[in-house]
């Protein structure tokens, strides 16, 4: 086919023409289309023109067509960029919604009435606090270039973070979009820990604790797994590439394990476990859990950092994981207690979402069902049996669901990851190699284990040190009187519900 | 004057109210309370852990009557509130020293 014939025969290009191509390119193409019929008639003749006789208009036409095609390519890239950016900004909003009001409601409903506001406030204030930290220094520590463990100060005050993409992270969206998306993760991760010290931690102590935790535990972990140069980074050539699509280790293991440390350090609530402390509103928790499920599509599918097939894959895996886990938990509870509770069912879905988080963009839909089912059952047992056996007061099961669920999910990712979903590993020649165990790569399980172990160690050590510091500086726990009165009144001077007061 | 305090099942409130209105009792105070006698509570589950709820919701009706109305009212309450099962409740009678109408200072039986 001659060059000119190819130019006429691309109907797709004509579509693009109709929608967005500037007039110049349109005119050039139109002109190019009208030329060939004449030229063809000429070149169809037995004698082709000799080089010295080639008309100068041919070369001019070449240049015009190259320019037109380059222009069209830019348009296409622009369109893809717009689609990806629209999706990523939407996902950022979805993930923020997971914290407020998703998590705020979920946790708020689980505590006693006298502590509902303080629990919600803890989630909410992180939306403000972590944002400021991220803008000043957090993003730089997590995603700036540094060493294998933590980023440096190159991007403090968001220097260098503008509308131009950073191809290391996401080539089709502005770096600023990537930054704001990652911020939502940085917000929700410490918020998960709230579940461990609910109903007994001083508000001021919590603020200081969260500031330090965000900088010392979250930012380095995020850097190691997702940052450039991070030594666990699977997509940027880390030494122990850990497959963690949306934050099984970074978000759930770190926060879950830190939660356990907090629960052990702070000690049990007054009256625990003898005094029954049922949720004051399973209705609120239900609403929160459903918001979490929907928001999680932004969390997992958005981690594809683009609006293409990988996002679809992650979206479906996320949903299937949640569904299977809800069934798993409910079934286990039904068998053990005789009745499936609503709180159990929604907790099950959360456990599944946690477990599928590291796996979402690496596993197929059927594997997602299996991962969800396992997580639902195991997390139920963690919460129903293991916690009672060891007697720690992880008030809202942050460790049982996030710590355990995240660990299971990260390890199962090493089992079920397949390159057909996400060709993340390539050999020196650029050929795709196996991802996980079922594809033949047993070694990946070891890497997953390393990633999980690092998250555990960083969570435990970092949290312990921070707790010691905060305890020394301002004291962690409220007084007994304040705890009995309830944190809403003692820490915030407010009551959640003023329904019974007459007048 | 006698105060009749009746603790009844929540589901029997409407029946008892009607029965009292039928015999001419015109004033009453109704409270939502929690408590138990010999009735066992029920078990609930929270995250796999089971605990017993032994403060059961009940309704308490308080009426202050002239002495001639007391026995009639007690019979009416019993007839309307009884289901025959444990948890039906109890009625207590106490003597009232004085009754005063706030609107016009009336005292004694005419204040009822």
Image (cartoon, coloured by chain):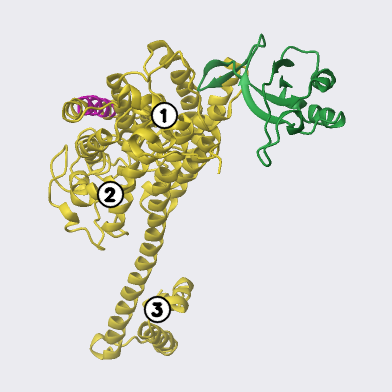
Chain colours: A yellow, B green
Question: Helix, strand, or loop for circle 3?
Answer: loop
Q: Is residue A465 left or right of residue B33?
A: left
**Badge 1 or badge 3: first in the primary sequence:** 3
Q: Residue A147: percent from the left, percent from the top?
A: 13, 41
Residue denoted by label 2: A131
Q: Residue A404: percent from the left, percent from the top?
A: 38, 25
**Badge 3 or badge 2: first in the primary sequence:** 3
* Residue B3 in which image quadrant: top right
Q: Residue furthest top?
A: B38
Seen from the viewer's position, the closer of residues A160 and A255 is A255
Question: Helix, strand, or loop for circle 2?
Answer: helix
Question: Chain ID for label 2?
Answer: A
Question: Chain ID for label 3?
Answer: A
Q: Residues within 10 Å of mark 1 (few under 14, many from 20)?
A: few
Evaluate whether residue B39 shows in this view.
yes
Magenta stretch: helix, strand or loop mostly: helix
- Examine the rendered structure and indicate whether residue A361 appears above or below residue A13: above
Does the residue at mark 3 contact the one at mark 2 (Cβ under 8 Å)? no
Residue at position x 36%, y 71% in the image: A75
Q: Which residues are magenta?
A: A452-464
Residue denoted by label 3: A21
Question: Chain ID for label 1?
Answer: A
Residue denoted by label 1: A438
**Badge 2 or badge 1: first in the primary sequence:** 2
Q: CA distance from mark 3 to mark 2?
A: 40 Å
Seen from the viewer's position, the closer of residues A155 and A38 is A155
Q: CA distance from mark 2 to mark 1?
A: 40 Å
């Amino acid at each position: 086919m001659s060059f000119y014939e190819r130019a006429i025969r691309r109907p797709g290009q004509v579509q693009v023409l109709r929608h967005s191509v500037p007039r110049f390119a349109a005119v050039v193409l139109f002109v190019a289309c009208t030329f060939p019929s004449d030229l063809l008639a000429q070149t169809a003749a037995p004698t082709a023109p000799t080089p010295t006789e080639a008309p100068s208009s041919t070369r001019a036409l070449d240049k015009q067509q190259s320019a037109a095609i380059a222009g069209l390519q830019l348009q296409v890239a622009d369109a893809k960029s717009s689609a990806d950016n629209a999706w990523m900004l939407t996902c950022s909003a979805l993930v923020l919604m997971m914290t407020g009001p998703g998590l705020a409601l979920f946790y708020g409903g689980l505590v006693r009435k006298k502590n509902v506001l303080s629990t919600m406030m803890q989630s909410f204030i992180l939306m403000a606090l972590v944002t400021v930290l991220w803008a000043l220094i957090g993003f730089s520590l997590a995603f700036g270039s540094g060493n294998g463990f933590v980023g440096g100060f190159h991007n403090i005050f968001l220097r260098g973070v503008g509308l131009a993409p950073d191809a290391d992270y996401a080539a089709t969206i502005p770096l600023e979009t990537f930054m704001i998306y990652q911020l939502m993760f940085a917000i929700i991760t410490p918020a998960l820990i709230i579940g461990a010290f609910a109903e007994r931690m001083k508000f001021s102590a919590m603020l200081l604790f969260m500031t330090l935790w965000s900088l010392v535990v979250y930012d380095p972990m995020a850097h190691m797994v997702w940052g450039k140069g991070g030594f666990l980074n699977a997509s940027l050539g880390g030494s122990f590439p850990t497959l963690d699509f949306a934050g099984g280790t970074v978000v759930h293991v770190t926060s879950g394990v830190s939660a356990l440390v907090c629960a052990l350090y702070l000690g049990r609530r007054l009256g625990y476990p003898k005094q029954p402390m049922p949720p004051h509103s399973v209705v609120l928790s239900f609403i929160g859990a459903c918001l979490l499920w929907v928001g999680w599509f932004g969390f997992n599918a958005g981690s594809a950092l683009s609006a293409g097939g990988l996002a679809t894959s992650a979206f479906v895996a996320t949903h299937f994981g949640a569904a299977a886990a809800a069934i798993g938990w409910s079934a286990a509870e039904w068998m053990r207690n005789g009745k499936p509770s609503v709180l159990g069912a929604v907790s099950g879905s959360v456990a599944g979402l946690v477990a599928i988080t590291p796996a979402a963009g690496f596993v197929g839909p059927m594997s997602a069902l299996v991962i969800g089912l396992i997580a639902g059952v195991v997390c139920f047992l963690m919460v129903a049996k293991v916690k009672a056996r060891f007697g720690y007061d992880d008030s809202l099961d942050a460790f049982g669901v996030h710590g355990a669920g995240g660990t299971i999910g990260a390890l199962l990712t090493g089992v079920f990851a397949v390159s057909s979903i996400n060709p993340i590993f390539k050999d020196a020649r650029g050929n795709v190699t196996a991802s996980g165990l079922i594809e033949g790569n047993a070694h990946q399980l070891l890497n997953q284990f390393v990633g999980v172990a690092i998250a555990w160690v960083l969570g435990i050590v970092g949290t312990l040190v921070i707790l010691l510091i905060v305890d020394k500086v301002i004291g962690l726990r409220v007084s007994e009187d304040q705890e009995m009165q309830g944190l809403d009144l003692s820490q915030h001077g407010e009551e959640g519900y003023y329904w019974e007061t007459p007048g | 004057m006698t105060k009749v305090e009746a603790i009844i099942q929540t589901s029997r409130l409407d029946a008892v109210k009607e029965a009292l209105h039928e015999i001419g009792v015109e004033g009453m105070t109704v409270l939502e309370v929690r408590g138990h006698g010999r009735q066992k509570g029920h078990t609930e589950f929270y995250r796999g852990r089971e605990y017993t709820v032994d403060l059961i919701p009940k309704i308490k009706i308080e009426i202050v009557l002239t002495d001639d109305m007391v026995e009639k009212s007690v019979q009416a309450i019993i007839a309307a509130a009884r289901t025959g099962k444990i948890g039906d409740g109890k009625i207590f009678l106490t003597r009232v020293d004085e009754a005063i109408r706030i609107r016009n200072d009336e005292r004694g039986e005419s204040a009822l």
